[in-house]
Amino acid sequence: TMATHAPAWRLASASLSRPMGKTAMTTFMILMFLLSVQVQRASSASQGASATFDDDEDDEVNVAPEPRRAQEQQRAPTPPTLETKRGAFEPDEEEFIFDEDEFEGFEGVSTRQDAPKDPEPQSKKKQARTPPPGAKGHVPRPKKELIEYYPEGMAVAFLFLFFLNYLYGRGVNTRLADKWLKTCNDILNENFAMVGVDSSGVMMRESANELMLYCSGRLNCESVMITLNLKPRQDLYSTVWDLLKPQIGGDNQDTVTVDVTLGSGPETGGNTEKYCFAVMPKNEEVKVRSEHDDLNEGGMRKWKTGLHESLCCTAEDEEVVRELLPEVVIPALNDNRQYIKLIHFSDRMETSSGRQRKGGLKFVFNLLPVDRHAAKDGGKDKTVEEKLRVGEILLRIALRYIDKATSTQLSGPARERIKKVQAMQRESEFKKTRSQREAEAQQRKMDKLKAEKAALENMSPQAAAKAEEKLLKKQRKNNAPVRAMKIK
């Protein structure tokens, strides 16, 4: 039963559940760059300070106070054997030992015990002897210009630009998802009893450019998951790349993916025929086949249909194509061919985990393609609202295809042909994996022999001889030819 009352439309503003890989990496690189610049500047500053300190010490050694030396010479005569030049022994040095017998009458220097101690430490003396600013011998430190901070300025400006672009791109994607959900809300409420988690009508935000909407409560299907994969407008790199590359044929496009999961019961599409069918653009056929294993199998053939030459149709049998591509649907697909990326029905479609295969349907449509092939518009591109209305039409076709695919009944000969094709596909897949299984079995055998040899090395000589003899008997038994037995 369908829901009688549609839930109020709104868009979830949940926080991001995925980490921003590119944003975090960019921030880390910029911080490391700033750290390296600061370390380099600190090292250069320390080298400059040490050089200035050495120059100050040289000045202190080479320049002596003349008045003080004159006073000392007048106070006490210098003995003939003692030099008064700079570099002679001084009383405050540890190597000096005063001998009264050797220096008689020399009262200018007292013993170390009697010498008065200077209460000021050596560091304060050096600071006092350092010439003040403006005096002779003072070297002023150069002032830093504003241009020397250009690395930090560029890094901060880049971070600011990155943050602004993230906010702007996230807002653009949110508004676009807003408009799409507002346009298609009536169709979803007509077809499903529950739109959104707990019938809230709210889209779940997986990231800044990916939003999902869960729907259930419909006949011929178990559930439907609609995913909006929008351009990563919040990423500055992707934004610049979109400006540089051409808009047509780019990898980053706004798409809508409708994943329909079929159940096992008759009311959820459990009685659907076993077949595989797909419609895709010719220029993306190789990519689509590589992404879907059931389409890459050898039994899938191309069939001539009424579709436009830019589209191709593949299936296992021609009867499947006739049933799933009626004359009513072909004109709608041809008129909106630039919106179609994939229409895929299969009984062995891979789930999100990639392990289990179930029956399902998958539709991938471009949300805002560059509509240059519309002849009725004179080659002009449509507005965003017009493109969203086209997306509404394609969503309605996709939901009607659920009933068409589950109710299609093939003839007996067509079923037999499809079974033969699928059997050939399973056999070819088994042959492809056979060599891999044999290599894995050989590797396990070699590992077992290595383990047995390692165990023999740790045994005593007698136990090792017994175990080796046992292994030889086992190898002879395995290599012995099989004899045919006669039954009387």
Image (tube, grey):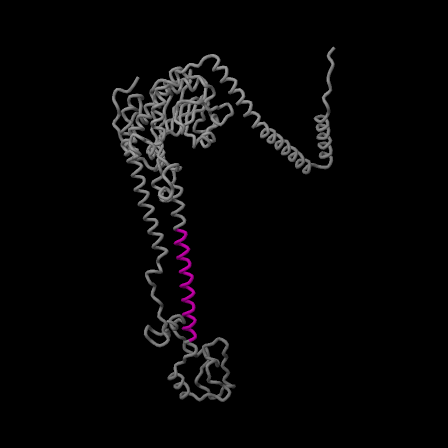
Q: Main secondary structure of the magenta part?
A: helix
Residue 48 image offset from top left, x and y in percent: 41, 66
Which segment did they paint magenta? 31-58
Quadrant showing the N terminus? top left
Residue 349 lies within the magenta run: no
| Quarter of the rendering containing residue 199 | top left
Quadrant showing the C terminus? top right
Q: Is residue 73 above or below residue 347?
A: below
| Quarter of the rendering containing residue 198 | top left
Q: Is residue 197 above or below residue 405?
A: below
- The residue closer to the viewer here, 439 or 92, is 439
Residue 430 image offset from top left, x and y in percent: 56, 25
Residue 79 image offset from top left, x and y in percent: 48, 88
Direction from residue 190 to residue 38 in the image, left or right: right
Residue 343 image offset from top left, x and y in percent: 40, 26
Q: How many numbered marks are there?
A: 0
Direction from residue 452 to residue 429 in the image, left or right: left
| Quarter of the rendering containing residue 435 | top right
Residue 41 lies within the magenta run: yes
**What residue lies at 38% left-to-right and 40% top-to-bottom?**
19
- The residue closer to the viewer here, 142 or 357, is 357
